[in-house]
Image (tube, rainbow, N blue to C red):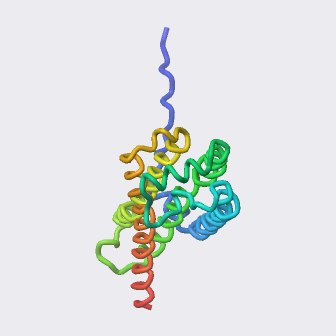
Amino acid sequence: MMLRLPAKARTIPVRLEALIPGLRRGAVALCAASVVLLVVMIVLEFFYFQRLSGGLSSLGMRLSGFSSDDAVAWLTALGEPGREAVLVWQYSSFDLFFPAIFGLALLGLFLNAASRSAMPALRSKRMQIVAGILVVVPYVLANYAQNVFIVRMLSDPSAASIWLTSVASMLVMAKFVLALAAIAVIAVVFRQNRGRL
């Protein structure tokens, strides 16, 4: 009697390099989706959330950060119904996807520009991917980290300690700075490519 060993399952390795052409082609669609999400969040901010908070801007929209007193004032002005509305319509929906979609859009734009770059450091596809990740991922991480801290305060206003609000404030400022830095790097690479034409 002969025993037959089960056939080995065939595995298909997925390489990041194989996804890059699709990401390059989809960069415009990702940019459009990012713009739509951003517009929706801005409309919610100015026509809904600020009405709930008596005109106070949301913590995640404050480019120059905020103090512990600012955070407490915003949370108090929102009240429980307002805090729940911000949690549902901002952090559990649109802002759950925006950082990732915008990050992918930036990565796609960077890779598209880098693929035409004459810079020696960007000649290989692997280096283009590594450079793109280094340019974009810090923004994405800062945005999601900021969201986690603000959600913590919205869920439990008593948790809005000086330490927590200080870290959240730094992350909000870092999010904007890192996004602008990524856009600036992409613009420089695009400009360099245009100079070659």
From what the image shows, is residue 133 above or below residue 75?
below
Query: x and y percent of residue 194 in the render?
Result: 45, 88
Depth check, front residue: 5 or 45: 45
From what the image shows, is residue 197 above or below residue 171?
below
Would you say residue 152 is visible in this rendering? yes
From what the image shows, is residue 72 above or below residue 42?
above
Taking the view exactly as shown, the residue that stands out farthest to the right is: 47
**Left or right, 114 with reference to 97:** left
Q: How many marks?
A: 0
Would you say residue 33 is visible in this rendering? no
Taking the view exactly as shown, the residue that stands out farthest to the top is: 1
Query: x and y percent of residue 80 in the render?
Result: 63, 42
Determine the residue positioned at 55% across, 62% down: 22
Determine the residue positioned at 50% across, 44% down: 153
Determine the residue positioned at 35% across, 81% down: 118
Q: Quadrant of residue 111?
A: bottom left
Q: Quadrant of residue 110?
A: bottom left
Taking the view exactly as shown, the residue that stands out farthest to the left is: 120
Depth check, front residue: 179 or 150: 150
Query: x and y percent of residue 99 in the render?
Result: 52, 57
**Left or right, 132 with reference to 72:** left
Depth check, front residue: 151 or 13: 151
Which quadrant of the figure contains the C terminus? bottom left
Query: x and y percent of residue 93 in the render?
Result: 64, 49
